[in-house]
Image (tube, rainbow, N blue to C red):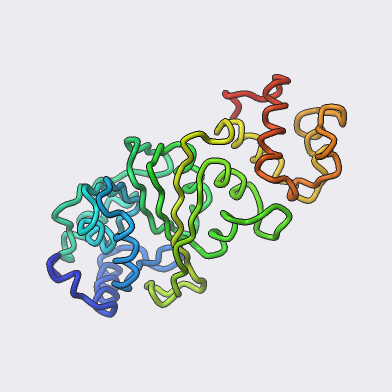
Amino acid sequence: MLGVNDLYAADKWTLIRLAKAAGRLGVRVGGDVHFMVDPAYLNQVASLTSGDDVFEVGFGLCYLTNYLTRYARRVSACDVNPTMVKVVRTLGLMPIYADLFICDALTYTPPPGLTVVSNIPYSITSPLLLRMLTSYSARRIIVTLQREVAKRLTAKPSSRDYGRLSVIAQCLSSIRVIRDIPPWAFWPRPRVYSTIVELTPLLKPCGDVKVLESLTGKIFTQPNRRVVKVLRHFYGLSESNVPRHLLNKRVRDLAAGDVIELAKILVDMGVIGNNTS
């Protein structure tokens, strides 16, 4: 068992040994669960929160949680697995200066103004990111996610990685890629690289959140079709309703500003509105 005071001096192999012990205590590892075990990367992520009030999504074995308490002013952390608190306590990893609780981050809404931090499980990356951006009212969002998802966040129109997540993220936040993290910084080792990304919500988002979610959720299911055909299919619009400069564009060619323009047209026509699901 490792004491919290010893955690900061522990090397990667000690943290891997503890993660294996957690597996023997019934914690699911592998699949989309990969614990960050490299102290250098744990410290770098935590250092980005200096002086902040932090909400961590998915505290897991509390490796990052403990590092966060070295830098942040206050730390609260949740996990969806109700057995994790007992496991963390058994392994001697319970943070002294953090509040742990159980919740589902896909339905829970934290207090506004916090810096949200998470090593996001692969299986819920897109829905959790969208919820953070649209429902959390965060001051900043610092996430570690698959490198391919980070590329989608910053992708340009017409590129392979561009899509719904790109539009919403770019309409609602400024995005800064911090650095890539190699697979060997995690255990079990994933097959892909990860990336640390910081998203800062815009004070004045460039579009209504609910309308953006509704519109992009429909049109980006058909990214290779012409915009006018997709709008006719979902909303009954004719060519006369679509701005001339968008008539020959395909959905994947729409810049964030184009999507905002279409959203405004649909709202003005009464086709979609704030209560649209």
Left or right relative to 128: residue 267: right
Residue at the image position 58 percent from the left and 60 percent from the top: 151
Left or right relative to 147: residue 55: left
Residue 170, placed above or below residue 40: above
As drawn, the residue found furthest toward the bottom would be 13
Left or right relative to 23: residue 229: right
Dividing the picture into quarters, in which one does residue 260 lie? top right
Which quadrant would the C terminus be assigned to in this image?
top right
Relative depth, front residue between 180 and 5: 180
Residue 129 image point, x, y percent: 48, 48
Which quadrant would the N terminus be assigned to in this image?
bottom left
Relative depth, front residue between 248 and 101: 248
Residue 30 image point, x, y percent: 42, 68
Residue at the image position 57 percent from the left and 30 percent from the top: 208
**Image mark count:** 0
Residue 95 image point, x, y percent: 17, 57
Left or right relative to 126: residue 54: left
Dividing the picture into quarters, in which one does residue 245 lie? top right
Residue at the image position 70 percent from the left and 52 percent from the top: 157
Residue 81 image point, x, y percent: 32, 52
Residue at the image position 22 percent from the left and 54 percent from the top: 85
